[in-house]
Amino acid sequence: MTTNLIDIQHADVIMATSNMAENHPVGFQWVMKAKERGAKLIHVDPRYTRTSAAADLHVPLRSGTNIAFFGGLMHYAIQKNLYFKDYVVHYTNASFLLDPAFKNATELNGLFTGYDAAKKSYDRASWKYQIDAEGNPKRDLTLKDPNTVFQHLKRHYSRYTPAMVERVCGIPKAKFEEAAQLFCSTSGPDKTGTITYALNLTQHTNGVENIRALCMLQLLLGNIGRPGGGVTALRGHANVQGATDLELLYHELPGYLAMPLRDAHPDLKTYLEKETPKGGFWVNKPKFMVSLLKAFYGDAATKDNEFGYQWIAKRASADAYSHQHMFVDMYNGIIKGFLADGQNPAVGGPNAKLARAGMQRLDWLVVVDIFLTETAEVWKEPGKNPKDVKTEVFFIPAAPAAEKDGSLTNTMRLIQWHEKAVDPPGDVQTDAQFICTLAHRLQKMYAGSKKERDRGFLAANFTYGSKPDHPEMVEVLKEINGVATEEITDKDGKVVYRKGQPIASFAQLTDDGKTTSGCWIYTGVTVESPDGKLINKAASRKPAEGNDYLAHGWGFAWPANRRILYNRASADLAGKPWSEKKKLIWWDPAAPGQKPEDKPGKWVGLDVPDFNAFLAPDAKNGDKPFIMRSDLVGGFFGPLNDGPFPEHYEPVESPTKNLLSKQQMNPVVKIWKVPDQKNELAPVGSKEYPYVITTYRLTEHHLSGVMSRYLPMLAELHHSHFAEISHELAKELGIQNGEKVTVSTPRGKVHVTAMVTNRLKPFVIDGKTVHQIGVPWHWGWKGVDQLPGSKGDITNDLSSTVGDPNVFIQETKAFVCNVQKGVV
Amino acid sequence: MSLSRRDFLKYGGATATGAALGAGIDMLPVEAAAVSLKIKEAKAFAGVCPYCAVGCGQLIYAKDNKIIDIEGNPDTPHTLGRLCPKGAATIQLSNNPLRPTKPLYRAPGSDTWEEKPIEWMYDQIAKRYYDAREKYFIENEKNKDGQVVTVNRLEAIASLGSACIDNEECYLLSKLNRAFGIVYHEHQARV
């Protein structure tokens, strides 16, 4: 999330594309606060929900057509000249000239230059800027050159007319234009708007391009980095942000550093050369990588052994090891042992039948969780004889947050510390205790090994504080933050850091082994007070007061306690707020400079600048706010595996032909072939599976249900598992409200209660009626026995193993199904 | 496992708020007194809601090593003390009779769990990790140009989770998995 929940109150228009009122209800109060100020709320969602009920305008769209919608908005803003021209010209790559060989998807009927149909991938040779003699991208600030990114953008989205949006998305033209006019009113110096999203945009085979399309619209309207603007990414778990930052992800190491690849990164030198861009803040990547290796391997990581780089595994391919690869490979016997720590893939992941079948083939399974989940009891799956499941299972009972100290990073990058209130009962373990105890046992087994491959593992420290199997969490946070490994002095010989002292800022990390940092973006979360005490800023709890509405004294937001990212963009080229109403940070020419001898001038205001605080607006790059990008500007043109501009493709399973081009689905989509008919797909326009289905979450349940189905207070709030079905479809199928229905796909079926409702309406897609149903996915066969409604069939048995080509996320928001009356 | 309706109330802790108060009679002072009695002498701990990622501040009241109430912390700038139904039910993650407190083991092909000592569990799990690494570890591999490259990779063990554990725990798990050579290393953010 680039922004902050509190700041939503300053938006003039909020476009919710997720169901924020029900899935992030406490955050939604800031939307309501904005409404009290007169802001308008648009809700874009196939279903009418409690978010729609609070909205000024509900815009239902067929699931899987988000890019057609956002593309339509960009087309509208460009056609009607409603974009924020000064922002677009100066703060984005709109003015950059592209290689004349590059062609967009309007010019190539749904493809971009370089597509290789046999390999199902793009050669990106032409996807680049024209470069001048000094090596900088050529620009045309008038935006008129046909090779500018802007002109390509205009041509690329020229097909996305309101009439086309109506045909593809099923949004009546007049309603689309009303929404477009309202949201485009946030363009310009005096107004801002924000867009919320959640899994509604990510769980698609073009999930990453969906998010890019949203961001591009915000750039076009000049809404990034400004109060009341930004991208409001609403994450689903208490620590999904933190677990991403600390990289429980196959493709990265903590702090968004690439996990090495065998072919590209044979040694540290090559890794750093290839991974470090020439411009932007990421030029510091070598400091972050070396500091991470020092945090992992301590004194054993030296300059002479590439700081232990070879002890980190190298991936065989970029197309391997993701969540979906994992269960396919488990089913195929490559994976023998599996740790499920606080996750329930028997219910929660795509194609859950395949996930369970995979786990039933393991040699061993370790589950660490608060309750006995369907994953822990995968050998008890209904209809399965336990005798046939040879998997050995170890269940370790885990402690919930209230029984341990630690920090969680919320959706707005805010790291908050929580305190242990009571001891865990019985033999219940904290996850940290489990990990450190297991590591210690393993180190004991490897003790004395002289093999090079074991040296790194033996060097990694898992003892924090005085009790080896009861790690002190503050000590772990300090390692994440980073410390000096030896005394560090400045050029005058003055001691800047003592050995072991926490580093105060990631700007002070080094690439020579003198600093550690387990995750550079967290540096600054633990600091030392002048009297040598460790201060845990995640535990600071100063309420918001006075001008500090962003509450910088509450927790610590990465990076460097900045609450709104790219906030240099809140000021104009000269460093003045675009308008008094929308001021956030600005250049104060009279403020003292960094050092007494420096020229005065500093960025000041209501937030910590996400910018070099002393870089004057008229200095080199002083007018380029997007510091994390190598070209320092916001990117309309942004190469991904499936193209540099988001293009609408139909979901892998769709009721209709793609009306925007001859490319039916994402041309580089990942579709896994799984043996034994474990991943069958419905053809386009299938008569057998004619209805669109979307899956979603409820206020009273949590994700795969582990933290709700076992809690009577929550488990009793829903009568049973259900499917939302429109009156129109129910009438066609003779289904009464409250009766059982069977929902099926080529992968599986579920029996659920029909909730016949006005909240869903059929769409008219290119003149034909298309029905869509909605099914929440919280249920499994376990729950509270006395509350039969707490148990139910697994919705993810319906979904498939297909993925976005960039990140391999599945497509559970838009696929097709059949609905039949009764239990079939 | 089973649970009676009475148990719900017993274990539910804070369920009996003002929902059933009679019309026309101002019961609020009574309720307030009851609440204040309940948390009297309890110590308040700073908590963060473990459900969605809004990160609502909580106050966890505990007495004699038992949680007796969890409510929103009104000082929290981004949530102002509010909790949703899930956040308000947090107490049942701890005080819940369905919650196992002993390690459990299920032998291959067995139809039942067995309680085992925690030390035994750690020894056994460590042995499984060790054996899989020794048997399946890939030290070197040819790259696309046919050159032998050190890869130090273990594909036989996969690790999943979690967005439900603390930052420090995520870091420790990343460190353990990466130092051990594990590459199937994922959590909920992917799905």
Image: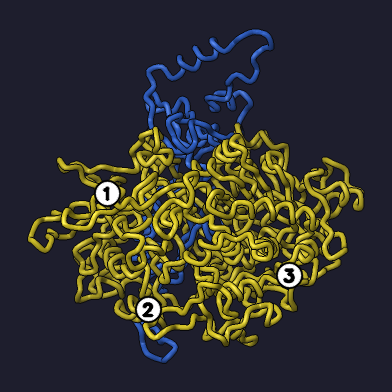
Residue B117 visible in the picture: no
* A267 lies above or below A374: below
Q: Mark 2, chain letter?
A: A
Disc number for residue A368: none
Q: Which badge, 2 or 1, comes first in the chain's sequence?
A: 2
**Residue under pointer 2:** A274
Which corner quadrant of the image does residue A285 belong to? bottom left
On-image quarter of the N terminus of chain B: top right
Between residues A575 and A209, which one lies in front from this camera angle?
A575
Disc number for residue A591: 1
Pointer 2 and pointer 3: residues touching (CB < 8 Å)?
no
For the point 34% across and 54% down, which residue is it? A522
Q: Is residue A756 left or right of residue A469?
A: right
Disc number for residue A681: 3
- Give the drawing colour for chain A: yellow
For mark 2, give the secondary structure: helix
Amino acid at circle 3: Leu
Residue A759 percent across, percent down from the top left: 78, 45
- Give the drawing colour for chain B: blue
Judged from this view, the residue extending furthest toward the bottom is B146
